[in-house]
Image (cartoon, rainbow, N blue to C red):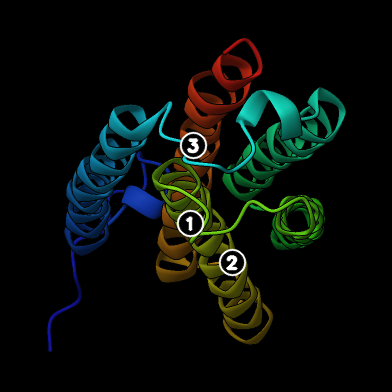
Amino acid sequence: MSHAHVDTSKPLEYQTQKDSMNILGFWIFLGAEIALFATLFGTYFVLTGRYADGPTPAELFEIKGVLIETFILLTSSFTCGIAIHEMRRGSKKGLMVWFILTLLLGLGFLYFEIEEFIHYVHEGATMQTSAYWSAFFTLLGTHGAHVSLGIGWMILILIQLARHGLNQTTARKAFIISLYWHFLDVIWIFILTGVYLAGMVM
């Protein structure tokens, strides 16, 4: 069995052709994810204003909670970026510490989002209330499910790092989860502006 050619002039996660192709494949996967969220956003915007007899977003949205969620998620994207910087420096410990911080922030984000959803349900806004709220919960629920998946994925990578150390394979996996995490952050910015801020002025 021949060893894959290793180009040490490149960052660790790009040093073999297999790893480079895997990263390229993940970019293509993100393209499909963009299409998914574009469809959900499209549905949401079409159904905006269809509140039936239910509450309107302007009645329920609170800027404080949304800003807390945004701050937590933006901070987690920053800590994720530092984790990859530490990886590039060859520091397994640094990568793991900053990934753990990213995880904790991700869990914090989910906690506040679930609290927010519970509040809406108490106020009479559920999937069944109206077309608008159905589209709202579908869009935000899909994003929240992706965040949950990202947390589980990151835990698995941390276990692999602890067992196998920092090598081309674990570096590639860490880099790919960082791309995924930044992608979720970008989607949230669209949610913040297109859903929350727009909803508050309707």
| Rendering coords of residue 168 (x, y %) | 41, 64
Residue at disc 1, secondary structure: helix
In space, the residues marked 1 and 2 are separated at their CA atoms by 13 Å
Q: Which residue is drawn at the image coordinates 20% and 76% (left, top)?
A: 3
Q: Secondary structure at mark 3?
A: loop
Tell me whether the residue at label 3 lies in contact with that at label 2, contact meaning CB atoms closer than 8 angstroms.
no
Q: Residue at x 79, y 58 (%)?
A: 122
Q: Is residue 2 above or below residue 132?
A: below
Screen quadrant of the N terminus: bottom left
In the rendered image, the residue lying farthest to the left is 1
Inter-mark Cα distance, 3 to 1:
37 Å
Q: Amino acid at mark 2?
A: Ser
Q: Give the camera-side residue of 136 and 90.
A: 136
Q: Which circle, 3 or 2, is nearer the viewer?
A: 3
Q: Say whether disc 3 or disc 1 marks the residue closer to the N-terminus.
A: 3
Q: Furthest-top residue in view?
A: 201
Q: Amino acid at mark 1?
A: Ile
Give residue 148's mark.
Answer: 2
Crowdedness near tag 3: few (<14), some (14–19) or many (≥20) residues, C-alpha within 10 Å: some
Q: Which residue is mark 1?
A: 177
Q: Quick one: label 2, few (<14), some, or many (20+) residues within 10 Å? A: some
Residue for badge 3: 51
Whether pointer 1 and pointer 2 mark residues with C-beta atoms closer than 8 Å, the reply is no
Which residue is nearer to you in this view: 192 or 28?
192
Residue drawn at point x = 66 percent, y = 17 percent = 200
Label 3 – label 2 distance at C-alpha = 29 Å
